[in-house]
């Protein structure tokens, strides 16, 4: 692959390749000297047109730990504010010859479009409600480490599915790896036609959580609700917020996940989120750095192989 735009383009073998390499980076990242030089000489530019804590920080750290020259554009302070378009901004940066471009954008499809215009490898760091592939890969690594496998598990994804790129990428990845997927949420937050993705849909947490291995909670993504119906937070917590009582319906060893940012007391009880016996939320963050290191190394290998092939053809 030249880019990492979405899980939809990956095969089960591709997914396992990323996770196996990421596993090696988990080990490296736990050592005092967390450094490798596999991206030495390469330039990585991060362009985040939407707020981020985890994804931006972990892509930056991932690039630095692999020896790349890393620059994060402060998009709020860029010429986008003077009316420059996404494509003109990308072409401007492309002229500076980066090798890896990491892009987050509020519009679905914007990152795919940008990838068609530039010469470097593009990694999708989240585009609208479309895909967030590295999030699904880090979630997969977290599940595989906690459960010892990534197939034949029953996974509940709960809450605002309709506006969630995290849910979409996870549904694609977990489906490709042959897991049972249950989506739980109010009908107003369930995307139309979701049944076609081979998932079971539940309106009620008690029914949906019964016997699952993994419970993945999602935030109400109000920034994407475009003036549509927004549930009251009190009512939402009562019906869909995960607490110890609702979790008791899942398997006794079920793990609790959340991609962050988390709204305590809205979609999840704060004490449960901090319970290290059930919650793997901090592991997800740690796996994020390792998975992004692996994804960038694999794309860099392809870039170098492409450059070698071009050089040989020109001889
Ligand atoms: N999970 C996730 O994408 O978090 P950020 O928005 O903080 O990057």
Image (cartoon, helix red, strand yellow):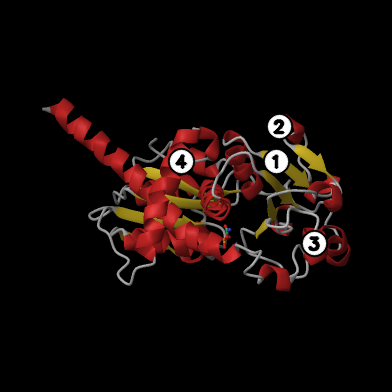
- Is 235 above or below relative to 168? below
Q: Point out which mark residue 60 bears.
A: none
Residue 223 in the image: x percent, y percent? 70, 58
Mark pair 1, 4: CA separation: 19 Å
Quick one: label 3 or label 4, which is nearer the N terminus? 4
Who comes first in sequence, dot 2 or dot 4? 4
Labels 3 and 4 touching (C-beta < 8 A): no
Q: Is residue 94 above or below residue 53?
A: above
Q: Nearer the viewer, mark 3 or mark 4?
A: 4
Query: Residue 38: x, y in percent?
Result: 26, 53
Q: Do the residues under discs 2 and 1 have CB atoms within 8 angstroms?
A: yes
Q: Quadrant of ligand 1?
A: bottom right
> Residue tagged by mark 3?
241
In space, the residues marked 3 and 4 are separated at their CA atoms by 32 Å
Q: Give the foreground label among 2 and 4.
A: 4
**CA gap, disc 3 and disc 1:** 19 Å
Ligand 1 within 8 angstroms of badge 3 C-beta: no
Residue denoted by label 4: 16
Does the rendering let one see residue 71? no
Mark 2 or mark 1, earlier in chain: 1
Q: Earlier in the sequence, mark 1 or mark 4?
A: 4
Residue 181: mark: 1
Residue in front for this viewpoint, 315 or 186: 186
Which element carries disc 4, helix, strand or loop? helix
Q: CA distance from mark 2 to mark 4?
A: 21 Å
Q: Tags 3 and 1 in contact by the CB under 8 Å rule? A: no
**Could you tell whether 13 is left or right of 130 in the image?**
left
């Amino acid at each position: 692959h030249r880019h990492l735009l979405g899980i939809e383009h990956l095969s089960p073998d591709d997914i396992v390749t990323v996770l196996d390499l990421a596993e090696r980076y988990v080990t490296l990242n736990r050592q005092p000297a967390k450094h490798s030089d596999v991206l030495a000489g390469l330039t990585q530019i991060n362009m985040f047109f939407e707020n981020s804590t985890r994804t931006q920080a972990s892509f930056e750290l991932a690039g630095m730990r692999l020896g790349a020259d890393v620059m994060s554009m402060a998009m709020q302070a860029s010429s986008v504010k003077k009316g420059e378009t996404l494509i003109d901004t990308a072409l401007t940066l492309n002229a500076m010859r980066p090798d890896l471009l990491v892009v987050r954008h509020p519009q679905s499809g914007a990152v795919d479009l940008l990838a068609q215009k530039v010469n470097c490898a593009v990694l999708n760091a989240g585009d609208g409600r479309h895909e967030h592939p590295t999030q699904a890969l880090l979630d997969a690594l977290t599940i595989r480490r906690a459960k010892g496998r990534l197939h034949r598990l029953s996974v509940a994804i709960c809450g605002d599915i309709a506006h969630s790129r995290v849910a979409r990428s996870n549904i694609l990845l977990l489906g490709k790896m042959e897991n049972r997927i249950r989506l739980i949420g109010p009908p107003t937050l369930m995307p139309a036609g979701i049944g076609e993705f081979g998932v079971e849909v539940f309106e009620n947490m008690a029914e949906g959580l019964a016997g699952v291995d993994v419970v993945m909670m999602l935030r109400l993504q109000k920034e994407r609700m475009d003036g549509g119906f927004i549930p009251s937070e009190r009512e939402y917590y009562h019906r869909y917020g995960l607490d110890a009582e609702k979790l008791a319906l899942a398997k006794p060893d079920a793990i609790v996940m959340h991609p962050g940012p988390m709204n305590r007391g809205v979609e999840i009880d704060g004490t449960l989120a901090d319970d290290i016996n059930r919650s793997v939320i901090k592991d997800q963050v740690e796996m994020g750095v390792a998975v992004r290191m692996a994804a960038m190394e694999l794309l860099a290998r392809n870039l170098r192989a492409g450059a070698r092939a071009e050089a040989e053809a020109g001889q």
